[in-house]
Image: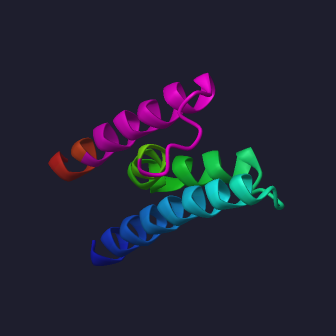
Amino acid sequence: MKYAVAYIIIVNILAFCLYGIDKSAAIKQKQRIPNRVLLLTAAFGGSLGALAGMYTFRHKTKKWYYTITVPALLIIQITAAVLLLSA
Protein backbone atom coordinates (compact mmCIF):
# COMPACT_ATOMS: atom_id res chain seq x y z
CA MET A 1 0.00 0.00 0.00
CA LYS A 2 2.75 2.46 0.89
CA TYR A 3 4.46 1.76 -2.45
CA ALA A 4 1.27 2.58 -4.30
CA VAL A 5 0.93 5.88 -2.43
CA ALA A 6 4.59 6.70 -3.10
CA TYR A 7 4.10 5.91 -6.80
CA ILE A 8 1.03 8.17 -7.06
CA ILE A 9 2.83 11.03 -5.32
CA ILE A 10 5.91 10.71 -7.54
CA VAL A 11 3.98 10.44 -10.82
CA ASN A 12 1.82 13.45 -9.90
CA ILE A 13 4.89 15.56 -9.09
CA LEU A 14 6.42 14.42 -12.38
CA ALA A 15 3.28 15.35 -14.34
CA PHE A 16 3.13 18.77 -12.69
CA CYS A 17 6.80 19.42 -13.49
CA LEU A 18 6.43 18.22 -17.10
CA TYR A 19 3.63 20.72 -17.73
CA GLY A 20 5.78 23.50 -16.26
CA ILE A 21 8.80 22.50 -18.32
CA ASP A 22 6.73 22.29 -21.50
CA LYS A 23 5.20 25.73 -20.87
CA SER A 24 8.67 27.18 -20.34
CA ALA A 25 9.88 25.55 -23.55
CA ALA A 26 6.87 26.93 -25.42
CA ILE A 27 7.62 30.46 -24.25
CA LYS A 28 11.30 30.17 -25.18
CA GLN A 29 10.46 28.42 -28.47
CA LYS A 30 12.65 25.46 -27.54
CA GLN A 31 12.10 21.74 -28.07
CA ARG A 32 8.76 20.72 -26.55
CA ILE A 33 7.62 17.64 -24.66
CA PRO A 34 5.42 15.53 -26.96
CA ASN A 35 1.67 15.58 -26.27
CA ARG A 36 1.61 11.80 -25.88
CA VAL A 37 4.13 12.00 -23.02
CA LEU A 38 2.03 14.61 -21.21
CA LEU A 39 -1.16 12.59 -21.63
CA LEU A 40 0.46 9.25 -20.80
CA THR A 41 1.84 10.69 -17.59
CA ALA A 42 -1.69 11.69 -16.66
CA ALA A 43 -3.03 8.28 -17.71
CA PHE A 44 -0.52 6.40 -15.54
CA GLY A 45 -1.75 7.99 -12.35
CA GLY A 46 -0.64 11.60 -12.68
CA SER A 47 -3.93 13.17 -13.65
CA LEU A 48 -4.17 15.33 -10.51
CA GLY A 49 -0.66 16.69 -11.08
CA ALA A 50 -1.39 17.21 -14.76
CA LEU A 51 -4.59 19.11 -14.00
CA ALA A 52 -2.80 21.23 -11.40
CA GLY A 53 0.01 21.89 -13.88
CA MET A 54 -2.43 22.86 -16.62
CA TYR A 55 -4.06 25.54 -14.51
CA THR A 56 -1.00 26.66 -12.54
CA PHE A 57 1.04 27.30 -15.68
CA ARG A 58 -2.00 28.09 -17.88
CA HIS A 59 -0.80 25.49 -20.31
CA LYS A 60 -2.93 23.39 -22.68
CA THR A 61 -6.15 24.77 -21.17
CA LYS A 62 -7.54 25.75 -24.58
CA LYS A 63 -6.97 22.32 -26.14
CA TRP A 64 -10.21 20.34 -26.01
CA TYR A 65 -8.48 16.97 -25.74
CA TYR A 66 -6.67 18.12 -22.60
CA THR A 67 -9.64 19.84 -20.98
CA ILE A 68 -11.75 16.72 -21.46
CA THR A 69 -9.20 13.90 -21.16
CA VAL A 70 -7.29 14.95 -18.04
CA PRO A 71 -10.37 15.55 -15.81
CA ALA A 72 -11.95 12.33 -17.15
CA LEU A 73 -8.79 10.43 -16.23
CA LEU A 74 -8.88 11.96 -12.76
CA ILE A 75 -12.50 10.84 -12.25
CA ILE A 76 -11.65 7.33 -13.46
CA GLN A 77 -8.59 7.12 -11.20
CA ILE A 78 -10.48 8.36 -8.13
CA THR A 79 -13.29 5.89 -8.83
CA ALA A 80 -10.82 3.03 -9.21
CA ALA A 81 -9.05 4.00 -5.97
CA VAL A 82 -12.34 4.13 -4.06
CA LEU A 83 -13.42 0.76 -5.44
CA LEU A 84 -10.05 -0.84 -4.60
CA LEU A 85 -10.00 0.57 -1.09
CA SER A 86 -13.59 -0.44 -0.36
CA ALA A 87 -13.06 -4.04 -1.51
Relative placement, left or right, of 9 versus 50 is left
Using the image, determine if residue 13 lies above or below residue 32: below
Residue at the image position 48 percent from the left and 60 percent from the top: 16
Say whether residue 80 is magenta: yes
Say whether residue 85 is magenta: no
**Residue 30 spot, x, y in % from top left:** 82, 61
Relative placement, left or right, of 68 versus 71 is right
Q: Which residues are magenta?
A: 56-81
Residue at the image position 52 percent from the left and 59 percent from the top: 15
**Residue 63 spot, x, y in % from top left:** 62, 28
Using the image, determine if residue 30 lies above or below residue 47: below
**Residue 72 spot, x, y in % from top left:** 44, 30
Residue at the image position 50 percent from the left and 43 percent from the top: 58
Main secondary structure found in the magenta portion: helix
Query: Of residues 52 and 47, which is closer to you in this image?
Result: 52
Q: Quadrant of residue 19?
A: bottom right
Relative placement, left or right, of 79 versus 27 is left
**Residue 7 spot, x, y in % from top left:** 42, 71
Screen quadrant of the N terminus: bottom left
Query: Of residues 31 and 9, which is closer to you in this image?
Result: 31
